Image: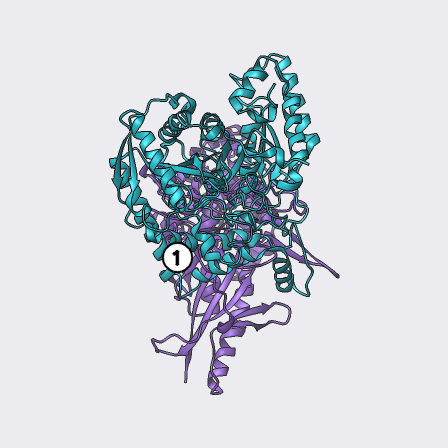
Chain colours: A purple, B cyan
Amino acid sequence: MEYEAVIGLETHVQLKTRSKMWCGCPNQFGAPPNTNVCPVCLGLPGVLPVANEEALRLTALTGMLLNCTIAPRAKFDRKNYFYPDMPKNYQVTQYDLPSTSGGYVDFEFQGRIARVRLTRAHLEEDVGKSFHFERSSGVDFNRAGVPLLEIVSEPDITSADMAYEYLNALKDILVYGGVSDCDMEKGMVRCDVNVSVRPKGSSQLGAKIEIKNMNSFSGVRRALEYEIPRQIEVLRAGGRLHQSTRRWDDLAGVTEEMRSKEHAHDYRYFPEPDLMPFEPSQAWLAEVASRVVELPLARKQRFMRDYQLPPADAQTFVWDVPLGNYFESVARHARNPKAVANWVINNLRAKLAETQTGLPDLKFPPTAILELIELVDSGKISTKIAQEVFAEMFASGDSPAAIVDRKGLAQVSDTAAIEAFCDQAIAANPGPVADYKAGKAAALNFLKGQVMKLSKGKANPALAGQILERKLKP
Amino acid sequence: MRMLNRLTISELVTRLASREVSSRAATQACLDQIERLDGRLHAFISLDADHALAQADAADRALALGATHARQPLLGVPIGIKDVIAVKGQPLNCASKILGRYVSPYNATVINKLQAAGAVVFGRLNMDEFAMGSSTENSAFGVTRNPWDLSRIPGGSSGGSGAAVVADECIAALGSDTGGSIRQPAALCGCVGLKPSYGRVSRYGLVAYASSLDQIGCFSKDVRDAAILLEILSGVDPADSTSVPQPVPHYAASLTGDVKGLRLGLAKEYMVGGLDAEIKAAIDAAVAQFEKLGARVTEVSLPHTDYAIATYYIIATAEASANLARFDGIRYGLRVEGADPIELYSKTRGAGFGPEVKRRIILGTYVLSSGYYDAYYLRAQKVRTLIRRDFLKAFEQVDAILTPTTPTAAFKIGEKADDPLQMYLSDIFTISANLAGICGISVPCGFTREPKLPLGLQLLGKPFGEETILRLAHAYEQSTPWHKEKPPLAALAG
């Protein structure tokens, strides 16, 4: 029998706020342990939470970016469980009235656009981080109370690779939208994976197995590459799977059971009495909506469609947004946007990197690139010379035409002058001349190169070719 | 001159302002009274006399430099603090063993407000552990005794605050009220106890028992002092999302003595059998007194009264089960080591919490459990809404509701200690106000004959209607002799 996997992901993302969720402590990675703490995030007796409004805004913004419905009324709840890294032994989260629900993520997968639907994205607080030493353990509460968004997908994912691509697409969207830096190294994204298998075509779901606390996308992929065949093997061997929670051992490359359903937590959710329900006004939502940006996939598709760019070029402008915006400002007026893309990607980007400068430092106006392209298209200068003109234009900010005039770089199309160069080249290279005459066509290119060299690159190459051919005709 | 510790806030302030007396002398008078009585009364868990006197000296210096009570209404006035409110640098035990030698690193908002007003903030007043109880017998530091009869309880949970004010160990005190924990001990000890409307006073720095019911309030020797304190304590606090941005009136201005035409309601559901005959007589007399003062008394109905106690013990314990989860031995307070975190929690909490606290945590855990949530917690929230509606509807007809504060006078220590349900019934008249979020005040309204024990009447007002109940309570108090009576403290000393 053939089996298929059904996968859903719960992705936890730290929001990019200056301060923590309930207090004014910095939301900052890498400080010495327990230095970004105060009575509130330590859960000392008597403290109360005050919701960070920017975290609420970023949550709504995420909802807008992920096509979710933004709740007219959201509230916070307490999720009760004991753990040493939990200052209050309850986590403030959103249970039955989350800030956003529904939505989806579209992404490129195996040459098509795949869609994973979302159940919800809700706001909660991060917990501290445990450290285990030789004889004791410690907890760093710097992370406790950092705003955390939990994005829950529907079980629309069917393979380890698809899970991997979904996560990357989600990350791109969140980084793009300024919602989170999604720095995996700093633990800003963590994942719980729900996976079950069933006979292919069945509409019934198998026993749900959760793999907890994955902290890299490649780890998720590897864990699924291990877990899916494991589950199928159990079923093939006539065994049964039961609902349970497993842990991924990254070194051993295996998952192992942590607890079964009988030992599942009863979190005893109830409404957080210390916080009022949140009802965003239209004006508040409009302000958040003004921060919505074009999503990576939409941008890529638009660049391919509107400017007829190949996927690789479009992708470059997705990854480098300012460069893409600059390209657009020029390409909008260009007859040949692909030529603009070539200049921007191959020349401009390289020059910026080489000089360690940015687009705002550019000395020439965007229209200069159009002028340069025009000089090449009209045969005024060769592509090779254009490189030199670009370098000069980048350095001085002078217009391409001015540079060409000043340096006398205009292409020589004067037949008499080129004939003279051709005669010189033929006289100086009897070998290649003999080769050409003997039927080796490639020798002509060598001679053409010699003409270009003698003319310091200014000879019109096409003209030079014609003249050489004529002169060498038997 | 009368002993300074016996003065009210307004009396002491007059003398401090005229520089007739010093804050040091007044504070020292309180400390001396504590020295004389508290060995037997046990209203205080601990006391930092040096800290108190240093604040008094600072107040005296400020007065010498021209500071005024117009700007700092409590300048130099010693105020005792219930052991559930955080004071920076002072122990915070909540009358529990579980906090060990914990010292608060920060001030509650009300403490900042009192100190900004110039008060001498001192002492850790005894209470039922984590404010759970009606007799102060649940303190891990020993019971507080009623100043009128040492064999009796002072009420609770703020029993230490009530006893200390009545025994003149401080000028006034702060307490907290989750189901009657200010009004009940005020009634049983014989002083004024005010529970403000939910959201009137910031809860930041009040160790939470039941977050949606808790409110800080005050104990005082008369109604005017309650008005003075409320004005200082009140106001929205950015650190407490449940505090309400409602303007703070000059409460003392509402004490006009004129209650003509004000409408007082008697809840027919509160006047049923089981009420102590002496209390009934005292309430009847108080009703007659209000009528004499020109108030109009009518009957109102609060149909869901019977459900209040059950509702309270579901909501309060549910919230408490989460609020008290942080006391786990990991970061502060008592720790009993274990082989793993679970064993450490279990041993620490087993050793650190008293029986009543454990009972309520277990009850609260139960009502929130999967499969029981809808039947208990959710239903209790619905009933709570009905109870609140009862009151809001009644307040369309009347300006305040008059009830006894307690069903009986102070009972004997140990009398109800083994019967939690009887103990829970002590709060039958006070508990609804917390569920409804309304304000309430208890004022002395007489005494039982033999033994002589104080009785209290309660006035309940609409949300943020403190001015009205203060006006009524003040007019009643000023036309009756009860608040002037003092317990036989001379017999207590030595």
Dividing the image into 4 quarters, which one contains the N terminus of chain A?
Answer: bottom left
Q: What element carries label 1?
A: helix
Q: Which amino acid does label 1 sit on?
A: Tyr
Image mark count = 1
Residue drawn at x 43%, y 23% is B252
Task: Name the spot of residue A108 as percent of width and height, x first.
Answer: 41, 60
Above/below status of A371 relative to A235: above
Residue drawn at x 62%, y 41% is B41
Describe residue B363's horizontal placement relative to residue B47 as left or right.
left
Quarter holding residue A327: top left
Task: Name the spot of residue B119 as percent of width and height, x first.
Answer: 58, 26
How packed mark 1 is, by other alpha carbons closer than 10 Å (few <14, some 14-19, many 20 or more), is many
Describe residue A277's horizontal placement relative to residue B10 as left or right.
left
Q: Residue furthest front?
A: B450
Q: Mark 1 points at which residue?
A: B377
Above/below status of A331 relative to A1: above
Q: Which chain carries label 1?
A: B
Q: Residue furthest bottom?
A: A238
Residue B201 in sight in this render: yes
Task: Name the spot of residue B233 as percent of width and height, x first.
Answer: 49, 30
Seen from the viewer's position, the closer of residues B121 and A359 is B121
Residue A103 in sight in this render: no
Quarter holding residue B51: top right
Task: Name the spot of residue B403 as percent of width and height, x first.
Answer: 36, 40
Above/below status of B308 relative to B202: below
Seen from the viewer's position, the closer of residues B300 and B344 is B300
Seen from the viewer's position, the closer of residues A27 and A125 is A125
